[in-house]
Image (cartoon, rainbow, N blue to C red):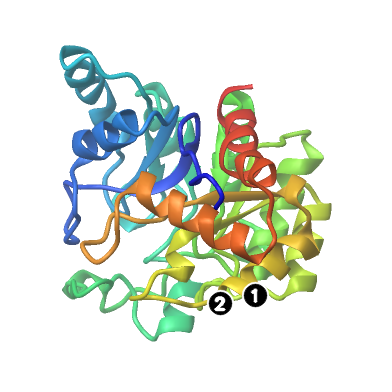
Amino acid sequence: MTDPIDVSGLIDIHVHCGPSPFDRRTDGYECAREAANAGMDAVVLKEHHLPTAYGVPYIDRLLERDGLEVDVIGSVVLNYCNGGFNPFAVESAIAYGADVIWGPTIDARHHAEQTGSLGAFLGVDAGAEYEDRDGISALEDGDLTADVRLCLDKVIAHDVVFCLGHLSYEETVAIVDYLAEAGHERIVVDHPNYGVTDLSIDQQRTLAERGAYLNFPFMGLSPKYSWISSEELYENIREIGVDRCVLSSDVGQQVNPSSPESLRILGETLRSEGLSESEFRTMAGETPRSLLFE
């Protein structure tokens, strides 16, 4: 009998929380408390609408009051409510302490092309304001727009993490190249096997070779969503290489377990396929730590 996977010291670089228009199982403090009680080192709080960075100081005060320790990382997602690729939103979020900037997700043009809807997600309908919108794109006539470049320049100047969100492969490559050419190494491509991003192994390998890390979440294995099998996920990681992969939870939905429990299940599942615990801890601990803190 093997010892259970230990999640202490791990970092969840992608977890959702309330308050949110979507039905979430915890608010930001409750999410942080679960991580702290499990001995995790850090969690990155993501919300598709408003920046989570604003609430982090209040969460930290509650954690201190309760004698709990975990680094809580704020972020912003560049959807319509934040002005899309809006350099003002990027600058203000970073000023509030955001260490992670996400590209558009539910408001990305590519998201709409893949799902058939823009803004509508997880049972929440899009309002009338979406009726004349095509979705946010990083490219115009094949080139990054001026505002995208301004946003990325701020990411580079402040040395924060940029996650690609729900952009197309063409947009993703252009952004990865722009950041990498500037020597920026904190680049993450989220859930490459998800139906929206849907990147082939060759595309993933290209992005890794150009300087990005591929983030594989528990969400892909969860019973509700299940977009990849454990065997496929294990083989995918082997194809890309442990040193260019990150593991996270992407949870926060009512149907999924907590961030710590999701990481534990993800670790146990991959171990059953042949991954070593050391490799798991590299992808769920050491690599996210280097992206966020080193």
- Residue shown at the point (34%, 24%) measured from the top left: 96
In the image, 287 versus 141, the foreground residue is: 287
Q: Quadrant of residue 160?
A: top right
Image: 238 above or below 59: below
Do the residues bearing badges 2 and 1 touch, measured as CB atoms within 8 Å? yes
Residue to which mark 2 is pinned: 229
Where is residue 233? Give x, y as percent: 62, 68
Q: Left or right of 85: which side holds 271?
A: right
Where is residue 53? Give x, y as percent: 32, 31
Where is residue 155? Give x, y as percent: 58, 34
- Count neighbours of disc 2 (C-alpha within 10 A) and say few if under 14, some if 14 to 19, many if 20 or more: few
- Residue shown at the point (61%, 57%) measured from the top left: 271
Where is residue 183? Give x, y as percent: 78, 33
Image: 235 above or below 60: below
Identify which amino acid the numbered label 1 is placed on.
Glu
- Residue shown at the point (23%, 38%) measured from the top left: 28
Image quadrant containing the C terminus: top right
Q: Left or right of 153: which side holds 181?
A: right
- Count neighbours of disc 1 (C-alpha within 10 A) and say few if under 14, some if 14 to 19, many if 20 or more: few
Q: How many marks?
A: 2
Dot 1: what SS?
A: helix
Identify which amino acid the numbered label 2 is placed on.
Ser
Dot 2: what SS?
A: loop
Q: Quadrant of residue 55?
A: top left
In the image, 245 versus 101, the foreground residue is: 245
Residue to which mark 1 is pinned: 232
- Residue shown at the point (28%, 27%) measured from the top left: 56
Q: Left or right of 6: which side holds 253?
A: left
> Disc 2 versus disc 1: distance between alpha carbons?
5 Å
Image: 235 above or below 259: below
In the image, 77 versus 258, the foreground residue is: 258
Image: 183 above or below 223: above
